[in-house]
Every structure is written in C-alpha cells, then in structure tokens.
Amino acid sequence: MQNIVERPNSGTPQPFKVVVPQKPGGFADRFDFTIEPYLGCTFGCDYCFVPGQSIVHSEAFMGAWGSWYYPTSENIREEIRHNFSTNKTSAIYLASNTDAWQPVEKKSLITRSVLCALREYEFSYLLCSTRSPLITRDIDVIKALRGDVQVGVSIPTNLESVRKLSEPAAPKIEDRIKTLKVLKDAGIRVRAHLAPLLPHGDDFVARIVDVCDSVWIDYPDSHTPAKEKLFIKNGWNDWLSKNLIEDLFYKYQNAFPSKVFKFGQKHFFDPLSTSAGN
C-alpha cells in the first residue's frame, strides 16, 4: 500500500483555482465551470486519464498517481461568490480531475465547504461525480442547493476481482451500489457511470437499474498508454473495442426500455430527462 502525501512539493505555487472556467474542446466543455477541490486523487485508478495532463506531470507533482493529493484554493467562498453571485444559469461539474469525496475529504471538509458556499447562489445544473460513499454525508447540503443537482456514481464492474486489478484503492462495488440507493431514497436524482465499462457479471446492469435514474456508458475517443497496458496485461483486449462497448450499450438499453441510457462523452453533460434515449 502506498504512503499518501499531502502537497508533495512545498515549493509549489499557491493557490490553484477551485472554480475553473471551461474552454471549447475539453471533455467537460459543455459545462460552464468545473469545481476542483483537490489536485491528485488517492483512489489512483489505473485507467484514469488525469495523470496524462501537464499539471500532474510537472516537476512539482512527481510521484506515483494515487500517492498524493493537493488541496486547492483556500479562498473557496470568494471564488464561489465571484463566479456565481450574478450568473444564475451556470452548468457546473464537480469534479473533472479528481474525486471530490476521496478519503482525505472525510477530515478536510473542503468539498463540503464548496457545497455550503454554493448553497447561497442559484445555478442551472450541477453534476457531482464520485465513486465514494462519503458523498452521502453531504445529502443535507446537496438537497439545499438552488439548482438542478444530479449525482453520478462510477461503477465500471460488479466483479471485485476486476476492481482489485484496476482500482484497488477505490471503494468496494457493493458500497457504491448502496450509495446509489441511499441517494435515490433521499430524493436526489442519480446516474450510474459505467465508465470505463470493464468485464462484469451477467446481473450487473440488472442490479444497477433498480437503484438509479439513468445509466451512462462511455467509450472514450482515445486510450491512455496506462489504460492500454492495464487491459492488455489482464487479457481485456476486447474491452478496448468501441464495437463491443456499443453492442453492450444497445443490449442493455433494449433489455431495460423504461430506463434512460446514454452512450459516449457527447452525452455526459445531458441532464436527466424523462424519456429513454441515446
């Protein structure tokens, strides 16, 4: 097990922005802003695209992905006020480059502070994405927010053997499925993010659809070298094929016609609707 380090280089300039305006061409460019409470993520999923970004590979952040985290700006309330006090139509993604509910959040409360600050302002749409049951701690604040809030929980497989090979530091699959149910029972609209879709058992999607409002399945336009290495090493070569993932998407969509299924990054932004579609 890796030692987890906060602020791996004390000389790194501060502060990094919590609220990041989005530019055309990025993964999250249909959102107006992303909110990044941390740099780095101690879940350290082996297939993650974030380690390939320049900020992570800069000299200040050398070290194995998953072994460090870095709290961002200490001026959370000011950043939230500056960006959202007069803009009531913002679409926001929390978070694109980290898991906002990674283990350190249990004590640091940075993400909770973001939500509490955001509670003061109106917005059009907030998508919270995580693989952590810790998000249920913040149900009270999430329900008090003044916009359309949806939560996506990442569940790429239902096989613990596959999870241990691809994201060994991440929460157990059963705990994530329970998280979907707790959020849904609390009246929060929830999405299951099957991304990347990994080898899984026959009853995987049947269990998922019972505890969520929609299912998003992704096939990225490109694969990172780390992801390709992981898949090849474990004999998952076929799962790098867009045709396989797309076939499974249509299979599941047809099997559960009353559930909303979405496929691909162009539909990641989509707020939940009341009709099925792709």
Image (tube, rainbow, N blue to C red):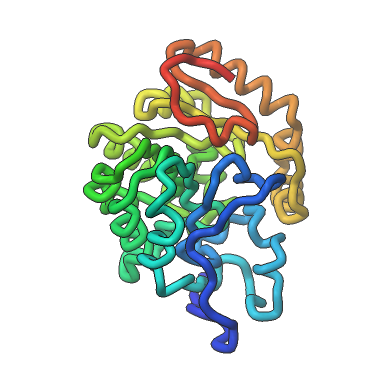
Q: Quick one: quadrant of the C terminus?
A: top right
Q: Quadrant of residue 64?
A: bottom right
Apparent side of residue 228 relative to residue 139 in the rendered image (left or right): right
Farthest-out residue, bottom? 11
Residue appearing at x 44%, y 22% in the figure? 273
Apparent side of residue 157 relative to residue 114 in the rendered image (left or right): right
Can the viewer see residue 153? no
Note whether 18 is above or below 11 in the view shown: above
Q: Residue 112 appears at what percent x and percent y?
A: 32, 59
Q: How many marks?
A: 0
Note whether 253 is above or below 148 in the view shown: above
Note whether 132 is above or below 78 in the view shown: above
Residue appearing at x 71%, y 26% in the figure? 244
Q: Residue 251 appears at what percent x and percent y?
A: 59, 16
Apparent side of residue 155 relative to residue 107 in the rendered image (left or right): right
Residue appearing at x 54%, y 67% in the figure? 39
Residue appearing at x 48%, y 71% in the figure? 72
Nearer-the-camera pick, 180 or 167:
180
Can the viewer see residue 4? yes
Note whether 2 is above or below 174 in the view shown: below
Q: Residue 143 appears at what percent x and percent y?
A: 25, 42
Nearer-the-camera pick, 49 or 268:
268
Q: Residue 216 appears at what percent x and percent y?
A: 53, 31
Q: Quadrant of residue 240?
A: top right
